[in-house]
Amino acid sequence: MPSEEFRLGWHACRDTLVARLAEPAPGRIQLLAGPRQVGKTTLLCDVAERFGAQALYAAADAPEAALPGFWERLVARAEETADNHGRAIVLLDEAHLLHDWAARLKGVWDGLRRRKTRVQIVATGSSALHLAAGSRESLAGRFERLTLAHWSARSVAEAFGLKDAQAAALVVRMGSYPGAFALRRDVRRWSAYVRDAIVEPAIGRDLLALAEVRRPALLRQVFAVAASSPAQIVSLQKLQGALQDSGALETLAHYLALLEEAFLVAALPKLSTQGTRRRAAPPKLVTLNNALLAVVDPRGIVDEEADPARFGSWVENACLAHAWCSGQRVSYWREEPLEVDAVTEGSWGQWAIEVKTGAFRPSELTGLLELVRRHPKLRPLVVCSSPGLAVAERAGVEAVTWQQFLLDGPPGVGAPGK
């Protein structure tokens, strides 16, 4: 993960952004990326309300943004606001939709800095690809990046007044998109919202707008197969065999990388016995919001009682996605016949994690114990249902329920980046 990027939950992201905007102007441009429908526009509106008359909101997808002179009018308004109110904060939503946005933003920022105009700039985008490419090419040294991640169960519980266990269960069964929350009791409307407001724009507009996507139908198939394989290790050869259209392995790997940049699917690498990641190993596919699982799977939302095996894979997927969205570096470990579901490194510390939703025996933790024997810096952790806590204790391994993990992460971490 780049050093200038931080994956944060909604409240932590807002607080970090407000703190940075309170610094002397003109400061670095703040680039805010994140998945669709996680509250980026709401966050900008909250920031605008906090700073009152000093804030200027502009949407790049609004009709006036397509008119000639948009940038010149925006700069003039910012300078006038700075003169009248001491400084200005420009909040540019969906900036990547503007033609040549990074070069124009660079010119604006350089001009304001030369004139010592007290203006701060925030630019958002649903496509990390557009923001990342543009910032590297034109804004080097001029920006800081924040990523507003998918919501955690803790954020869902606090925002909608749910009990902790209820929020965790919803995150597993229906994901955590806040905009879809009000529709959760009408599954057809909820599914249509996720497909039409999230999946289709992300794949049909954000990704297909890139020159690198030369085979749109193949990209859609890669997403569908990945979202049908929650928390599964899938070789590129096996992925290739599951597709209707043939594609080179390099193309499939590239499309998986694009899906990760779009906050849809993460291809977790394998951790070798030497503690280094091996790119040649098959990836473990984790869909970054379980709502996507529910709309891709023809069986629909999982039922724990009717299909415990599928429910277990969805819980594991949600837990690994939570770690990824919390900014951890996540991999898996496997040396036949031993396997560990996840290895996380980052602000949580270093953990080796095994996810068990059904009944299990202490002997099934052999892989976990072997990995931490080889890598003593890793703390072993079993994420399980309540009855499994006693089993893990008998094996001498720390344990936490999957509900608590989705709420607060590993023991002692608290509610990271909520």
Image: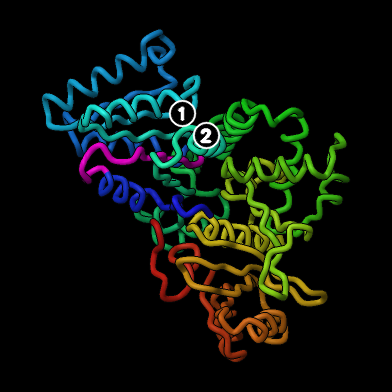
Residue 229 point in image, percent of width and height: 73, 52
Residue 371 point in image, percent of width and height: 67, 80
User: Residue placed at 57% from the left, 79% from the top?
Assistant: 378
Residue 262 point in image, percent of width and height: 58, 40
User: Residue placed at 30% from the left, 14% from the top?
Assistant: 73
Secondary element under disc 1, as helix, strand or loop, is helix
**Colour scheme:** rainbow
Secondary element under disc 2, as helix, strand or loop, is helix
Q: Looking at the image, is 359 positioned above or below residue 266?
A: below
Can you see residue 39? Answer: no
Query: Residue 334 occupies which quadrant of the picture?
Result: bottom right
Q: Estimate the spatial distance between the alpha carbons at disc 2 and disc 1, rounded to whole Å.
A: 8 Å
Which class describes the residues within 10 Å of circle 2: few (<14), some (14-19), or many (20+)? few
User: Residue placed at 29% from the left, 29% from the top?
Assistant: 90
The one nearer the camera, 252 or 358, is 252
Question: What type is the residue that disc 2 sits on?
Answer: Glu
Question: What type is the residue that disc 1 sits on?
Answer: Ala
Contact (Cβ within 8 Å) of mark 2 with mark 1: yes
Q: Is residue 417 left or right of residue 56?
A: right
Q: Residue furthest front?
A: 114
Query: Residue 317 occupies which quadrant of the picture?
Result: bottom right
Q: Which quadrant would the C terminus be assigned to in this image? A: bottom left
Residue 244 point in image, percent of width and height: 86, 36
Disc on res. 102: 1
User: Residue placed at 51% from the left, 75% from the top?
Assistant: 400
